[in-house]
Amino acid sequence: MGLESASQEKKACLLARAWDWLKALPKSLLGKLLEFGSNTKKIGQDDPRKVIHSVKVGVALTLVSLFYYCQPLFDSFGVSVIWAVMTVVVVFEFSVGATLGKGFNRGMATLLAGALGVGAHHLACLSGHIGEPILLGLFVFVQATTATFIRFFPKIKERYDYGMLIFVLTFSLISVSGFRDDEILKLAKNRLSTILIGASACIIITIVVFPVWAGEDFHNLIANNLEKLGSFLEAFEGEYFKASKDGNSEDNKSLLEAYKSVLSSKNNEESLANFARWEPGHGRFQFRHPWKQYLNIGALTRQCAYRIEALNGHLNTNTQVSQEILSMIQDECTQMCSESSKALKELALAVKTMTKPSLADTHIANSKAATKNLKSLFQSNFREEANLLAVIPATTVASLLVDVVDCTEKIADSVNKLASEANFKSIDSTVSLEESQLQKCEPAHSEPKTDSLHVVIIVG
Amino acid sequence: MGLESASQEKKACLLARAWDWLKALPKSLLGKLLEFGSNTKKIGQDDPRKVIHSVKVGVALTLVSLFYYCQPLFDSFGVSVIWAVMTVVVVFEFSVGATLGKGFNRGMATLLAGALGVGAHHLACLSGHIGEPILLGLFVFVQATTATFIRFFPKIKERYDYGMLIFVLTFSLISVSGFRDDEILKLAKNRLSTILIGASACIIITIVVFPVWAGEDFHNLIANNLEKLGSFLEAFEGEYFKASKDGNSEDNKSLLEAYKSVLSSKNNEESLANFARWEPGHGRFQFRHPWKQYLNIGALTRQCAYRIEALNGHLNTNTQVSQEILSMIQDECTQMCSESSKALKELALAVKTMTKPSLADTHIANSKAATKNLKSLFQSNFREEANLLAVIPATTVASLLVDVVDCTEKIADSVNKLASEANFKSIDSTVSLEESQLQKCEPAHSEPKTDSLHVVIIVG
């Protein structure tokens, strides 16, 4: 009796739990749905191109599946039409470059592997009824092993990984199917033509309807990363040296955090550069745009971001900094910060608008001059300070800023190289266009003019 | 006549060029072949598991294609066997985790999409001859658009991206094929069962034959990264403070460069962690091993590597450093370097051997003590130095070292957390096993004992 009642209690308990779960189900489902909705809204607002891309995939797939519904189209390919549908699903990527790369890989690999597969099948046929499966198995084994190993080669992995996969797939498919199907040539031909149809549909739709160019994204990413570093330096100047200004510290906080994404942008940059190389000329970019130089700029930008990360560590420490040393170096450090910041922003603008960065050199020269002044300050003006401990944080910041100025100079050289490789426009022709954006930099712009005036006078 | 001779000249020129190309062909082909050979050898030597993986793929593919050659096996599935071959090609990945993830995604997505596809087909059938293709097209469009958009959700992209792709593929395949093929249920069943056969073959072979565990790779990566930072600090100490020792500078150079791979290891760590989560318990790792904590350690290691990057910049500059200040801070900085280095290596060893890092805390305490001494040195002992410019590089290095010590402490906390979450063994039980590896740290090990002795005396 005791056992029975215990098992009844257990049952009741389980039932109660199940009931609770069922009662909670609508609520949790509703919660999930609401979360889904808000996620959808956020992604759609952040990048409406993602919504458009989804619709494009839907349209391409529906179009290709028309082959099934339309009798004359279906008659010419038969059930092979399914390969066209499959091709659309796997080839259609977000950017034009990625789609082209995958389409090219799939097409070429199918062609090559199809031809080899047919050859292998014929060779195997010659060896009689018993030899055929053995020889076919051997072929499949050898090509799968070889191709899988080749996929580990870094250069192949970078650009032709998907092609190698499709090569293995098609070769196995054709050579093995040949064992059961005598119309192997027709099979190979149908597979190739339906894949080409699918890939063409993807490529046409991705290029014609609201194209997303990986090259443009890459270009903007590099420019934005430079901009982020520039903004950090501007905000840093305000935070570190003018601690009294608390008014806009919320804005500053986001500016001071933005650079962190630069630290880990390497993989993103590399894959975008890889996609961009597949793309034809579009808008302001030609077919052989020097994407490699963008990668160099990206690497130098990251170098600079590492220094900035170290600099950022000095914002949040509570160590006491001697006010004396701060006020002594403030002018020069502020100058270094603001001039490097202007230079980086100018470089970002130059990349973004594809114009030669005419003002950046001036800003860099100014920041270099500030560095020099700072050094001579340190050499001469510092005889009474006793407590080095309170001095060190400030000098470390100064030293890191010197590093940042050096990095900025390297970035400027790299951008200049890009400007000459990609034939960036000279600024004069576009000055009226960008005037509003450049106004802030105007005072600095007038400096070199006086400089050249001096030269004229001296030479005169 | 003039025109004719010109065109003849052109032809001759073209012929000569073609001949040159043909003559050069064997040489360039031979060069390519030799390059291929040396690449193969290098990859095979660096990681023999890659060779084994390639052979495993070949074996799996050959085994699955047996279905074609064997009459009774072929009779039960027909041409659907091709899906098994395809599954092997696309699912078989390098590590067990990646293969399991893809296999699970493919299986589940096929099951779900197959069921929905059959349902959609039946629904469309009800709407008559004209309505059927329209309704089918609508279904395909809606599901393709929705699923493509859901792939942008970060959480889905991370773990179920491939599953979403296969969902779109299978749903389109089943629902569209249904328009031409009345045996749609058989089609769906055959697709599901052949995919399950292919996926099982992959999973069994990948787990049974020389398994490559992503978890183990991840575990080792994290430990090696810690080790690299430790080695850098050891080498840095030698290079910066004892410039006279030029004997082993070649060895040092590679130690000083090794940390750079840590800077960009984020993506690698994230994908390995993702694969590791799919893996069942194996060797020293249980199913729910705290991989997230490894990611935390990785992030902190990168933080430390950023500081080290700034430190590395001070090795190669030609700025004059005051010998006076160098000799003043040398002892403390050397202490900070070597103790942090020992702590990091100890933590690496602890992670690698899955034992509690008993000695790391002592090393960190020592480096903290050195930091404290350095600070009081700076406070008291520095009244006569006049030329701050020659002092700054050394103080900056000291300041960065202080940052590194802080980072090391954070890493140690994180490793301790991992040790308690993953139930690392206590070191006492394994001391005989790892004795040889730990011998270097022995002197430091004796220190806490004297400390505890002191306490006993005081308490007593």
Image (tube, coloured by chain):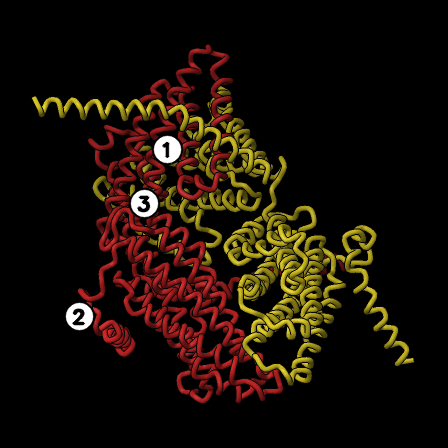
Chain colours: A yellow, B red
Q: Residues within 10 Å of mark 3 (few under 14, many from 20)?
A: many
> Mark 2: which amino acid?
Ser
Q: Earlier in the sequence, mark 3 or mark 2?
A: 3
Give the residue at x 51% y 18%.
B134
**Number of numbered discs on residues:** 3
Q: CA distance from mark 3 to mark 1?
A: 16 Å
Q: Residues within 10 Å of mark 2 (few under 14, many from 20)?
A: few
Q: Chain of mark 3?
A: B
Q: Chain of mark 1?
A: B
Q: Position of residue B124 (x, y in %)?
A: 44, 16
Q: CA distance from mark 3 to mark 2?
A: 34 Å
Q: What residue occupies the far right of the structure in this picture?
A: A460
Residue under label 2, please give it.
B432
Q: Earlier in the sequence, mark 2 or mark 1?
A: 1
Q: Position of residue B269 (x, y in %)?
A: 40, 55
Disc number placed over residue A174 in the picture, else none: none
Q: What residue occupies the far front of the structure in this picture?
A: B460
Select label 3 or label 1 by which is in front.
3
Q: In this rendering, does residue B253 appear at all?
A: no
Q: Chain of mark 2?
A: B
Question: Regarding mark 3 in the picture, which secondary structure is present there?
Answer: loop
Picture layout, residue B149 above or below residue B348: above
